[in-house]
Image (spheres, helix red, strand yellow):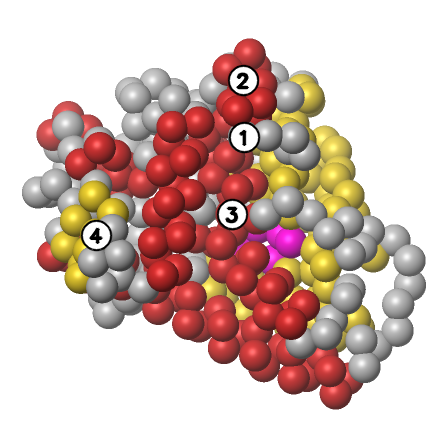
């Protein structure tokens, strides 16, 4: 079974017409990846080739489906010597989010997710959920025996940021990247937001910013659990959460964690992580709520 985060942002269109638009879609990190680039064909062709190469490089670090990826090797052995800098960067952000969200963001939920997906012992798997069991240094990343990590709640956003950075390095000034999450170079780009249960409820506009959406009900595991699991043993409180931030990785992690926080807690989490963050949530009744 493929684990995915079901982003429900429907469409993106530039609000002003631009010449020489190039668009391409592929599959990366278990999600549909799309780049929409505006510029001279010779520039967009070169930038697109380099951006896809960067995406493939990032996938070799974070893929759970490739047994040779850095993350898969860490999970298999419980230790990864000389971890790649991209893995260290994402784990550092994961640690910050774990603290800021009061433990709601915790990549060690992977054994618990697999237990729900495969009919395993969820009580035993829950005992393995413990971010404090992970040690991170430039020399090695280690896990407590039995632990495994999933970075699906942040790696897609990180890949989106990295690909966007490559496009900027190639001289593009107007582009939209979607790798499960969205990141814009300039803009504005308008995105329609849809909840799986209640349909289209709103929109966001990106202008050099990023956006991520999480919906617990977008994927239901075989035992009936939603694909967003609370590391602390609770249950999701919202039908959909959308976060706009400067970086897609931050928006990605926050949209997951805020599904598990009530409105007051969500506002405190957003305050801890600084200005410039915007979040909206859809209640189970279908009401749109500004966080």
Specify the segment rendered in magenta.
178-183
| Lower sequence index among marks 4 and 3 | 4
Q: Specify the label residue 141 is tagged with.
A: 4
Q: Callout 1 environment at 10 Å: few (<14), some (14 to 19), or many (20+)?
A: some
| Disc on the earlier residue, 3 or 1 | 3
Q: Rounded to the nearest whole Å, what is the CA distance between mark 4 and mark 2? A: 30 Å
Whole-percent x, y for residue 284 in the image: 56, 20
Q: Residue furthest left?
A: 145
Residue under circle 2? Answer: 268
Q: Residue furthest front?
A: 138
For the question of whether residue 218 can be seen, the reply is no
Q: Secondary structure at mark 4?
A: strand
Look at the image and say whether residue 252 sits in the magenta stretch.
no
Residue under numbered circle 3: 249
Q: Nearer the viewer, residue 209 or 37?
A: 209
* Residue bearing the label numbered 1: 273
Residue sitting nearer the eye, 28 or 170: 170
Q: Is residue 204 left or right of residue 183?
A: right
The mark nearer the N terminus, 1 or 4, is 4
Task: Give how far apart the Cα atoms at labels 4 and 3 are.
Answer: 20 Å
Mostly what secondary structure, the magenta segment? strand
Classify the position of the C terminus by image quarter. Answer: top right
Disc 3 to disc 1, C-alpha distance: 13 Å
Image coordinates of residue 176 in percent, x first then y, are: 70, 60
Q: Position of residue 88 (x, y in %)?
A: 34, 54
Secondary-structure class at tag 1: loop
């Amino acid at each position: 079974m493929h684990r995915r985060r079901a982003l429900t942002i429907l469409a993106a269109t530039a609000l002003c017409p631009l010449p020489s638009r190039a668009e391409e879609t592929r599959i990366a990190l278990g999600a549909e990846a799309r780049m929409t680039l505006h510029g001279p064909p010779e520039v967009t062709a070169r930038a697109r080739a380099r951006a896809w190469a960067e995406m493939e490089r990032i996938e070799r670090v974070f893929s759970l489906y490739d047994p040779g990826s850095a993350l898969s090797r860490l999970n298999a052995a419980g230790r990864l010597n000389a971890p790649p800098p991209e893995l260290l960067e994402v784990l550092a952000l994961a640690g910050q989010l774990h603290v800021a969200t009061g433990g709601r963001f915790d990549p060690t939920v992977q054994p618990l997710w697999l237990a729900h997906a495969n009919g395993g012992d969820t009580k035993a798997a829950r005992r393995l959920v413990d971010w404090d069991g992970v040690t991170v240094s430039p020399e090695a990343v280690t896990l407590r025996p039995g632990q495994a990590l999933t970075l699906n709640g942040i790696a897609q956003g990180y890949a989106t940021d990295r690909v966007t950075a490559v496009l900027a390095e190639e001289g593009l000034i107007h582009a939209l990247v979607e790798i499960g999450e969205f990141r814009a170079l300039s803009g504005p780009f308008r995105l329609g937001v849809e909840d799986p249960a209640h349909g289209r409820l709103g929109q966001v506009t990106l202008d050099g910013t990023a956006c991520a959406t999480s919906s617990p009900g977008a994927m239901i595991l075989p035992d009936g659990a939603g694909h967003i699991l609370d590391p602390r043993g609770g249950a999701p409180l919202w039908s959909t959460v959308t976060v706009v931030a400067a970086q897609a990785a931050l928006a990605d992690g926050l949209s997951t964690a805020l599904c598990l926080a009530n409105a007051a807690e969500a506002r405190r989490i957003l305050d801890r992580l600084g200005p410039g963050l915007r979040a909206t949530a859809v209640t189970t009744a279908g009401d749109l709520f500004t966080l």
